[in-house]
Image (tube, helix red, strand yellow):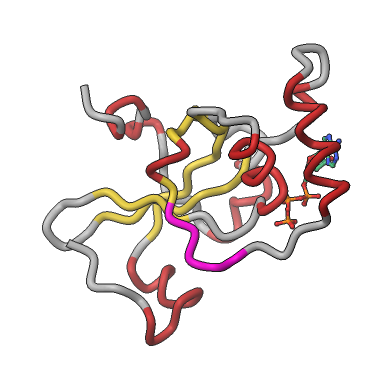
Amino acid sequence: MTEQENIDLKTSERLPEHLSVQAAHIQEVHNVPMKVLIRPFPSVLDEKKVVSLMETIENPETVDLVPPIDILWIKGRQGGDYFYSFGGCHRYEAYKRLKQEFIPCKIFKSTISDLQSYLGGSTPDLL
Ligand SMILES: Nc1ncnc2c1ncn2[C@@H]1O[C@H](COP(=O)(O)OP(=O)(O)OP(=O)(O)O)[C@@H](O)[C@H]1O
């Protein structure tokens, strides 16, 4: 099984804009391998918030207080799978420092043009 098969992608659906708020309450949470996430932008971090999040995540009694991060799932033109992460900077950093292999995510099926709205002319040619 490849890393990406760990994620049950079949259950993810692209959300129409007008449904995103309602659907946010019902969309499934997937444990996504940290190493498949692509984060094009450096994070500006509040150190205290990262440390506080680490403590919350480490404690089984409080970990559920931390919501999943949102990621974009984009299919390349030759079928490749790409998982982009833009927000969730503090949660991502906390999971990274805790050396967690997986991070809880909501996966939004997205297109190259969605990606272009973040990356503009720097959008890569995804295969
Ligand atoms: N100890 C904690 N410190 C900060 N946030 C916490 C903590 N425990 C639970 N949370 C929750 O985790 C989420 C953190 O989201 P927040 O938008 O503040 O940061 P982020 O998305 O990880 O980073 P950024 O907004 O910089 O991209 C919030 O929903 C918050 O309620």
- Camera-nearest residue between 18 and 122: 122
Name the residue: 59% across, 51% down. 19
When the figure is inspected, residue 121 is found, relative to residue 100, above or below; the finding is: below
Q: Which residues are magenta?
A: 38-42
Q: Position of residue 96 (x, y in %)?
A: 59, 39
- Camera-nearest residue between 3 and 116: 3
Q: Position of residue 33 (x, y in %)?
A: 43, 33
Picture quadrant of residue 103: top right
Quadrant for ligand 1 reads top right
Secondary structure, magenta segment, majority class: loop
In the picture, measured across the screen, residue 123 lies left or right of residue 80, that is right
In the picture, measured across the screen, residue 12 lies left or right of residue 127, that is right
Quarter of the image containing the N terminus?
A: top left
When the figure is inspected, residue 8 is found, relative to residue 83, above or below; the finding is: above
Q: Is residue 122 magenta?
A: no
Name the residue: 74% across, 26% down. 57
Which residue is at the far left?
Answer: 78
Name the residue: 45% across, 33% down. 32
Q: Position of residue 110 (x, y in %)?
A: 40, 58
In the picture, measured across the screen, residue 9 lies left or right of residue 61, that is left
